[in-house]
Image: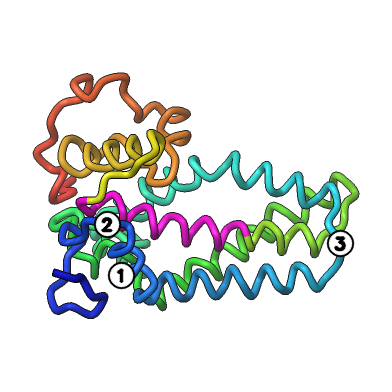
Amino acid sequence: MAITSDAAGLRADDLRTKREIARVYVARGSARVLITAAIVLGAVRLAVAGFDRGDLLVAVVTVAITGTVEWIIHRFLLHAADDAWTSRTLGTGTGHRRHHLDPPDIDWLMLRGVDAAVFITAFGAVTAAWTIPLMWLTRSAQLGPFLTAWTLAAIGLAHYEWVHLMVHTRYRPRTRYYRRLASNHRLHHYRNEHFWLGVTTNTGDRLLRTYPNEKTDVPLSDTARTLAP
């Protein structure tokens, strides 16, 4: 039976092929917001000026910090307690708790469009906070590299949403890299929520020691589904 993006009650574990995943992905508000943002930001970057060493520098830094940024967001925003300021104000902890209770539920698995817009705006502010001083220190142009980094952030968020959807489906990636991501994310949900926090990369887990050599090195958690303190 063909899967359509608007099928009532559709869940991630109903999806078996990359084409089915793509149909659902592009129909979601978060993907549309993030892809549009990446295209617009990329177009503005191309219109501003030529590329120089500053663009290469911010690209390298962006790739290098992606795993750690994912880890921090996952640990301190998504796994925040219900009474934490971030949960009460942004609802991040509450929504992610719903995701852990029923991981294949797409409504809680992927961001809402408005949430994606908030994230990409916040990432713009954070990107400005580190790229502009870095460009000043290296005596490079500031606006162009800032836009490059912000564009890469939008692409990274869109990639995050794609990977997060994919790893909760029945599709099995062909590459070893994505198969490992899928396996590690399932361990995060069904073995121990304190480990394997990365979604698109596990570099943050390796750096911050939440990437055990073997899954049996960490205990089976009773709170992986509830995120109870």
| Residue appearing at x 77%, y 48% in the figure | 134
Q: Mark 1 or mark 2: name the one nearer the start of the chain.
A: 2
**Label 3–label 1 contact, CB within 8 A:** no
| Residue appearing at x 53%, y 45% in the figure | 66
Q: Secondary structure at mark 2?
A: loop
Relative image position of residue 68 (x, y in whole percent): 49, 41
Which residue is labeled 2 in the image? 17
Residue placed farthest to the left in the image? Answer: 222
Disc 1/disc 2 C-alpha distance (Å): 11 Å
- Asked if residue 32 lies left or right of residue 13, the reply is right
Q: How many marks?
A: 3
Q: Mark 3 or mark 2: name the one nearer the start of the chain.
A: 2
Quick one: 102 or 210, which is closer to the camera? 102
Circle nearer the viewer, 3 or 2: 2
Which residue is labeled 1 in the image? 24
**Label 3–label 2 contact, CB within 8 A:** no
The relative height of residue 94 versus residue 189 in the rendered view (above or below) is below
Residue type at mark 1 is: Val
Label 3: how many Cα within 10 Å (few below 14, some 14–19, many 20+): few
Circle nearer the viewer, 1 or 2: 2
| Residue appearing at x 84%, y 47% in the figure | 53
Q: Secondary structure at mark 3?
A: loop
Q: Secondary structure at mark 1?
A: helix
Q: Quadrant of the C terminus?
A: top left
Relative image position of residue 191 (x, y in whole percent): 16, 35
Extent of the magenta region = 152-170
Residue type at mark 2 is: Thr
**Within the magenta stretch, is there residue 154?**
yes
